[in-house]
Image (cartoon, helix red, strand yellow):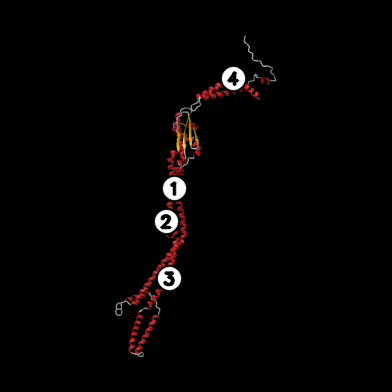
Amino acid sequence: MGSIIWGNIYLFIEIVWRRRYYLAISILLALFFATLMSVLTPKRYNAHTSILVQESALLNPFLEDLSVSFNLEYRMVALRVLVNSRHILTTVAEQNLLIDENSNYREKDLMVERLSDALTLTLSGTDLVVISLTWDDPKEIESILSSVSRLFIDSLMAPSRASIISSEKFLLTQLQLRREKLVDAEEKMADFRRQHLGVLPELFIQNNQTLFSIYSEIRNKDIELSGAYGQLKSLKLKLAQTNPVIGVVEEQIVAAEAKLSLLKASYTRNHSKVQSVELQLNNLRNEQQKLLSKNVALTDQQLKQLWNLASVVDSSDSEGKVPSLLLSQLENLQSSQSRVVQLENEIAMLRQQAKSLTNNVAMEADVAKELSALQRDLTVNTKLYHDLLNRHEMAKVTGELGRHEEAEKIKVIDRPFTPGYPVNLSLLVYVFAGFFVGIGIGIGLILIVESLDDTLWHIKRINSFDGVEIVARLPSIGYEKE
């Protein structure tokens, strides 16, 4: 096995040596073209800038809930597409005077494509962005990278800035709308409470207690009024019995009794004068009983006449004084009538109040239902208003925090610079590459030429030709020219 391998190696070396001119020419041509390529290839320069993007949670964990996260890992693909977009690259080209407004569309498209191929955006770790640029003019690299980094930072900050600004505007609009609705709900609630001041649910128990006390007071007043009616009727009856005729009869009875006493002192009981006076006295007493037994109801006109009678002064008998019995009875009657009128008015007023409170108590269910709806609407609007106000203030604080932390969140670690040497491969690398490429091409060419050559120069080929056996090998004999 080993002899076969070494035999093949020897055969390969023999073929290469025999065809060495092909190998040499291939190597020389490859070296020539490699050197030519090294000289003619345009010089390419490379520079980069690195940007550190830190989250607020890392800067200040205490303000994490007030900050807006960048989500750099999830947005990196979108940012890479955005930086390589036509809009961004056109802006970069215009800022660096690579194109102008007079450039045609083809020139603009070629420049955008060239910039897109030259730019590389990579994420190192979780928070370090590296922007690399490979360009043929080293003087333009720094300005191009500066423009790209500024636009990248703007694109990175744009969503948070736009979201905060739009959130503030939206919340301010909603806040004004909710304020109007809240004021309207408060006005409706205030108007409803003013219109149903005595029917409010919080007064329901008090109204019931007041109604119970009014009914109790009405019962007491009814009892008192019944007594006042009885007293007034009794006074009217007594006043009806006290009239001038009865007074005259009583005076005559008194005069007759006085006269009878004087006659009994002078005469016996059987005397005619005594008997005459006794008969007169009995007649007067009978007349008195008849007058007293009559139940006479006095009218208002008769009571007025009695007042007039009580006001008349009897100069002969009373010496200018009003009869005391009649006057006192009339005064008691007047007081009783006043009391009756007072009690009737009080009862009427209490009944009116009871009716009003009964209506209020009956309306309490409907009022409570409507008041509950108004209160629910007011509560919802109040809660929404306070929530929106809180969110608006939080959005303002978040915006201020973002503007305050912007310089700390995004830091340029490596600023764009002008490279001092090209990134092309050196001449030595090209020479080595050309040398090995030439060797490969030469060996390939040798194998192709050898496979196409039908010369019988090897023992194996002669043995394989019609089964001819080799007896001996003679070395090449050179003949000198005569």
Task: Tell me residue 174's x, y (percent).
Answer: 44, 47
Element at label 2:
helix
- For residue 191, which numbered disc appears in the image? 2
Closer to the eye: label 2 or 4 = 4
Identify the amino acid type marked 4.
Arg
Q: CA distance from mark 2 to mark 1?
A: 29 Å
Q: Of the residues shown, which amino acid type is indicated by label 1? A: Asn
Q: Are marks 3 and 4 in contact (CB under 8 Å)?
A: no
From this view, report whether residue 393 is shown above or below residue 3: below
Residue 267 location (% of width, % of height): 33, 90
| Residue 272 vertical position relative to residue 368 in the rendered view, above or below | below
Question: Mark 1 sits on what residue?
Answer: 390
Give above or below for 174 relative to 321. Answer: above
Residue designated by label 3: 223
Q: Amino acid at mark 2?
A: Asp
Q: Which part of the image, by quadrant, shows the C terminus?
A: top right
Q: Say what secondary structure mark 1 lies in.
A: helix
Disc nearer the start of the sequence (3/1):
3
The first of marks 3 and 4 along the sequence is 4
Return the disc, 4 or 1, that comes first in the chain's sequence: 4
The quarter of the picture where the N terminus appears is top right
Q: Residue furthest top?
A: 482
